[in-house]
Image (tube, grey):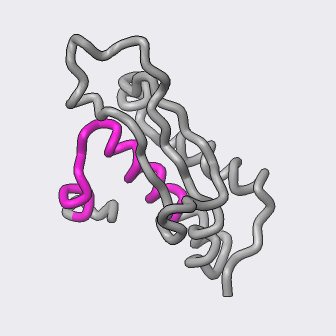
Amino acid sequence: MPVEMPRARFEELVSEALDLVPREFAKAMDNVVVLVEEYNAEEPSILGLYHGIALTERTSQYGGVLPDRISIYREPILQICETEDDVVDEVVTTVVHEIAHHFGIDDHRLHELGWG
């Protein structure tokens, strides 16, 4: 049975997950914003999505662009979790996974590292 959780609490969990990012990585994050959204209309079951140009792919031509976005999708995460502790764990995993994409780490490598 999916977990029911107010949006404000879910947003707190995302904020807490961001606080777990080591300071060196947080400082290196450049021109990126993290948003909570209900779900992705094109792929309703995905948990998160990085929209942007990874740091490893930016050239000297990069500039004057809107921030990259990391979307964390509330409904799909709540659907796959059975307890609030499960939600906490899944939010951390999803936030780390999407931040890794910002740093240019692909899904294959993330799975190898245990951040599926």
Lateral position of residue 80 relative to residue 9, left or right: left
Q: For the point 65% across and 77% down, which residue is it?
A: 83
Quadrant for the C terminus in the image: bottom left
Indicate yes or no whether the magenta region holds residue 74: no
Q: For the point 70% across and 48% down, which residue is it?
A: 12
Give the quarter of the image for residue 51: top left
Lateral position of residue 101 relative to residue 10, left or right: left
> At which x and y percent is residue 88?
59, 62
> At which x and y percent is residue 79?
62, 77
> At which x and y percent is residue 40?
55, 59
Quadrant for the N terminus in the image: bottom right
Q: For the point 29% across and 36% down, which residue is it?
A: 103
Q: Nearer the viewer, residue 43 or 85?
A: 43
Q: Nearer the viewer, residue 16 or 38?
A: 38
Q: Is residue 31 above or below residue 85?
A: above
Q: Is residue 16 above or below residue 27?
A: below
Indicate yes or no whether the magenta region holds residue 95: yes
- Which residues fall within the magenta stretch? 90-111
Q: Is residue 110 above or below residue 12?
A: below
> At which x and y percent is residue 109?
19, 56
As drawn, which residue projects farthest toward the bottom? 1
Q: For the point 64% across and 67% down, which residue is it?
A: 75
- Name the magenta segment's main secondary structure: helix
All told, the count of numbered labels is 0
